[in-house]
Image (cartoon, helix red, strand yellow):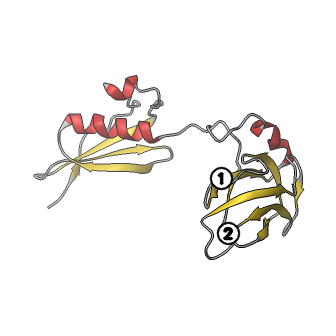
Amino acid sequence: QRVRPSARLTRPSVPSGPAAASPRSGPLSCHHLKRYHSSNPARTRILCHSRRVFNSILSNRPWVLRSQAACFSQSMRVYSLPPHQKVELPALSPTMQMGTIARWEKKEGDKINEGDLIAEVETDKATVGFEILEECYLAKILVPQGTRDVPIGAVICITVDNPDLIPAFKDLTLDK
């Protein structure tokens, strides 16, 4: 069965209802909307940002389209921080569940060369050096020296590739 395109809307779509009132929802900037008709339910696609398809839905009910737009706009995030890497506490021994940051070898703002130790971590068995395998700068230490029972996978510090980006992380805390 053949599908034929119907009218194309060229104005941006703005969510209504709960999505418009949501503080997390940003403007939805869709370039155009296509709806295809057939004897089956219509297939609607919102084409946004360089014609990338973010979502498609199978339904011919208008409220579903608004709902789809609301879900899309609520999932968009606005980042105010420059590009960075979140360094997580790795499992430094096979039985390690938690660790203690015994000592930081680097300070905030220090350059980290490939293979440099950044911290000493006490595991359930021993104290082990934790190294980073790429060149970067230590932008922010999130877990202070002496902190006990830090779970594996917890973000312990932030690194950046450019030293000019470090001041952007000055006030960053684990809560943000």
Q: For numbered disc 1, what is the local secondary structure?
A: strand
Q: Nearer the viewer, residue 106 or 4?
A: 106
Q: For numbered disc 2, what is the local secondary structure?
A: loop
Q: Nearer the viewer, residue 33 or 55?
A: 55
Q: Residues within 10 Å of mark 1 (few under 14, many from 20)?
A: some
Q: Is residue 87 visible?
A: yes
Q: Quadrant of the N terminus?
A: bottom left
Say what amino acid the circle numbered 2 marks. Answer: Asp
The residue to which callout 1 is attached is 155
Q: Residue at x 63, y 69 (%)?
A: 96
Residue at mark 2 to residue at mark 1: CA–CA distance: 19 Å
Q: Quadrant of residue 72?
A: top left
- Tell me: 166 left or right of 12: right
The residue to which callout 2 is attached is 124
Q: Quadrant of the C terminus?
A: top right
Q: Residues within 10 Å of mark 2 (few under 14, many from 20)?
A: some
Q: Nearer the viewer, mark 2 or mark 1?
A: 2
Q: Is residue 85 visible?
A: no
Which percent across, then down, holds residue 175? Answer: 61, 38
Which percent across, then down, holds residue 43? Answer: 23, 49
Which percent across, then down, holds residue 131? Answer: 80, 66
Which percent across, then down, holds residue 152? Answer: 61, 61
Which label belongs to residue 89?
none
Q: Residue at x 40, y 45 (%)?
A: 47
Reply above or below: 119 against 96.
above
Say what amino acid the circle numbered 1 marks. Answer: Val
